[in-house]
Amino acid sequence: QKKLLEQSQETHEFQAETGRLMDILINSLYTQKEIFLRELISNAADALDKLRFLSVRNPEILGDKTELAIRIEINTEEKSVSVTDSGIGMTKNDLISNLGTIAKSGTTQFIEAIKGGNVNLIGQFGVGFYSCFLAGQKVTVASKNTDDDQYIWESQAAHSFAVSKDPRGNTLGRGTQVTIHLKQDAVEFAEESTIRELIKKYSEFINFPIYLKVTREVSKQVEEESEQQDQ
Ligand SMILES: COC(=O)c1c(O)cc(O)c(Cl)c1CCC(=O)Nc1cc(O)c(OC)cc1O
């Protein structure tokens, strides 16, 4: 299965400027890892706004997935955090162009702002997504737009990313799910108390409901031990 996925994956180099920007972002903001959550919540809200705007003119775009919401899930076993929205979603080409290139102009101002430590400017350049690599050693983005099948984009930074059709099929219905596989020094973001506090901090101006789900898989080993104690 793993081999199959690798064969079906297309690997892409980040556009050179994107790679440089990611390096600067990660090197200058490594002490403020938590901003990844602010950027993901903000991107999710933007994608929901885009959908809501389009649905005013053609309501059928909502299909049967009419709820516009953001779901955050932490998995304490796998040390991952995911942010899922039922927004407009991205096609395969959107994933490659939006996440692989800095299509926005003004990247030099962005770099000056980051070097000056002005983290609030990140979102304005549409590149907040790369802050995921402050906390994540690997980032996976699954997305479903009405114009395409569901695709997966995956990267471990290091200047390249892979795109493949999602072998799970259309599990999202519509929208985007960003999953961050946390770095060893960022596992605090898989703790419920940490995430609850950050959601409160960064959801003040968000006009969509944000739900939190905590998945705690107790490893098989521990269950067996507890059974022995009971006997
Ligand atoms: C449409 O946006 C998304 O699907 C989406 C989301 O729902 C949640 C997310 O965390 C992210 Cl990162 C996205 C993609 C947002 C994005 O990168 N948009 C974007 C970036 C560009 O460079 C661009 O240039 C033309 C256009 C974009 O929409």
Image (tube, rainbow, N blue to C red):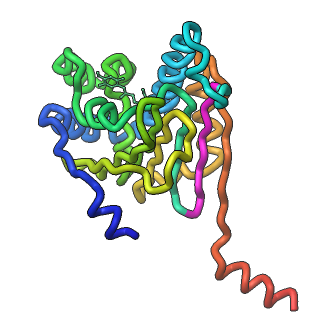
**Rendered residue at 63%/25% (across/down):** 68
Horizontal arrangement in the rendering, residue 91 relative to residue 192 (left or right): left
Residue at the left extreme, as displayed:
16
Side (left or right) of 7 relative to 228 = left
Pinpoint residue 96: horizontal percent, then vertical percent: 27, 37
Identify the residue shown where x is 67% and y is 70%.
218
Magenta residues, start to end: 68-77
Q: Quadrant of ligand 1?
A: top left
Residue 59 locus on image (x, y percent): 61, 15
- In x, y percent, where is residue 222? 69, 79
Q: Residue drawn at (23%, 27%), measured in percent from left and top?
A: 102
100 falls in the magenta region: no
Residue placed most toward the observer, 127 or 95:
95
Residue drawn at point x = 60 percent, y = 32 percent: 70
Q: Nearer the viewer, residue 65 or 22?
A: 65
Q: Is residue 144 above or below residue 116?
A: below
Main secondary structure along the magenta-highlighted residues: strand
